[in-house]
Amino acid sequence: MTLTSAPAASADVFAPAPPLAARARSIGGSPVRDILAVTARPEVINFAGGLPAPELFDAEGVAAAFRAVLEEAPAQALQYSTTEGEPTLRAALAARMSVRGLPTDADDVLVTTGSQQALSLLATALVEPGDTVLVEEPCYLAALQVFGFAGARVLGVPGDADGPDPQALAELVVRERPKLLYTVPTFQNPTGRTVSAERRAAVASVAAWHGLWVVEDDPYGELRFEGERVPWIAAHAEAADRTVLLGSFSKVMAPGLRLGWLRAPAALRRACVVAKQAADLHTPTVNQLAAARYLADNDLDAHVVRVAGVYGERRDAMLAGLAEVLPQGASWQRPEGGMFLWVRLPSSYDTTALLSEVVRHDVAYVPGAPFYAGEPDRATLRLCFVTETPERIGEGLRRLGEGLRGVSPTRSATRAG
């Protein structure tokens, strides 16, 4: 065969490159990230982000752990590792779950590059294009993105301040035959609500009787300010063979480590291991060993108690000022922990349309609409209270009140339309 070169041509006559995959074309960016990009100015008091307070990181403790690992085991720390994760870290994670009422062996655990990767691995292992996935309504935004990217048909489960309605869940499972339910039952993002023990038991029962995977995401559960800890859904015997528990160091140690994990039944865990091999081979070895060393040399629980104490003060500062700045008829929930407050303004307000006006007052929130799989409640918004001091929270609320008063609800609804 003789190869000949194409005649010289200008770029404007070349054939176009092949298009992106349909799933990449259909999924937009993150509205929260877009808002953070706009509100990154230091003068903006930012209630929009879901970031932990950086001044509370135990930077010296983490640095000491990295130094120890790199001085004592540099060849191991800088080498490839197993996909499942470093044995010392998996054992430590299993011990932490066991102490909290969920007997776990190291072999039950897969270390992931943040719990966000765990969601992606589960979508790869469980979801075929066109499968139905159930989520809470409203739902963690990045979960909606993951399942949408997998080609799932995502449906919201109706609920109230106590979480998803078990009867509505059962009816949806019977009618729609979904593959899984995704839930953040403790200090949920975005609402801050916690599902009661009774409802958790009911969810486990629905999963058992009707054949349903439950993906239980718990990134915030250790950040409790008040009240008693509620056992995981995964701890219910009925759902033991069909519940995946996700965890993360992002909110209790540092998000930059990108360390998460999933605890899953053997067959599903093995499928996630294969998916992770294709994605990144393994989570960085040095980060895993440093986290394991940190757990061995430090009292993470005591550190979390200190962080939760500060976060509780900041929650209280926000709760104390809301009534003065929100319009009459607004309502909100009091979370027992976590990072977020969920606010509902009177139905005549549209928080997406209002945001640009509010940002002019150098304060920001996240509109509630993107958190819904179905028809959104456009009068809702999410406030993060952990990254600002009580003094700045007070000033931020004052600015928020000015911004809300500056635009009438009728005008905001018109702009949204």
Image: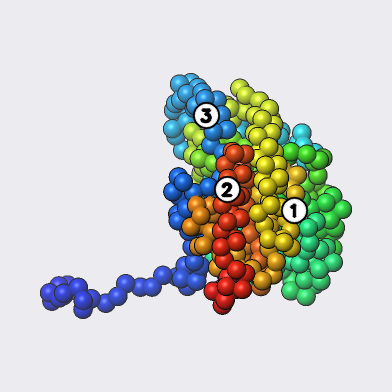
What label does residue 293 carry, if any?
Answer: none
Quarter of the image where one finds residue 416: bottom right
Q: Nearer the viewer, residue 261 or 44?
A: 44
Q: Is residue 311 above or below residue 133?
A: above
Identify the residue at horizontal 81%, vertical 40% (top origin): 227
User: What type is the residue that disc 3 sits on?
Assistant: Ala
Is residue 121 among what the camera can see?
A: no
**Among numbered discs 3 and 2, the one appearing first in the sequence:** 3
Q: In the figure, is residue 63 to the left or right of 313?
A: left
Near mark 1 (Cα within 10 A), the count class, few <14, some 14-19 or many ≥20, is some
User: SS for tag 2?
Assistant: helix
Residue holding disc 3 = 59
Where is the C terminus found, in terms of image quarters? bottom right
Q: Position of residue 179 (x, y in %)?
A: 70, 65
Quarter of the image where one finds residue 57: top right
**Among numbered discs 1 and 3, the one appearing first in the sequence:** 3
Is residue 336 among what the camera can see?
A: yes
Identify the residue at horizontal 27%, vertical 77% (top origin): 15
Identify the residue at horizontal 58%, vertical 27% (top origin): 294
The colour scheme is rainbow
Q: Position of residue 209 (x, y in %)?
A: 84, 63
User: What type is the residue that disc 1 sits on?
Assistant: Gln
Identify the residue at horizontal 15%, vertical 75% (top origin): 9
What label does residue 333 carry, if any?
Answer: 1
Q: Is residue 74 above or below residue 90?
A: above
User: SS for tag 3?
Assistant: helix
Q: Position of residue 38 (x, y in %)?
A: 45, 56
Residue holding disc 2 = 396
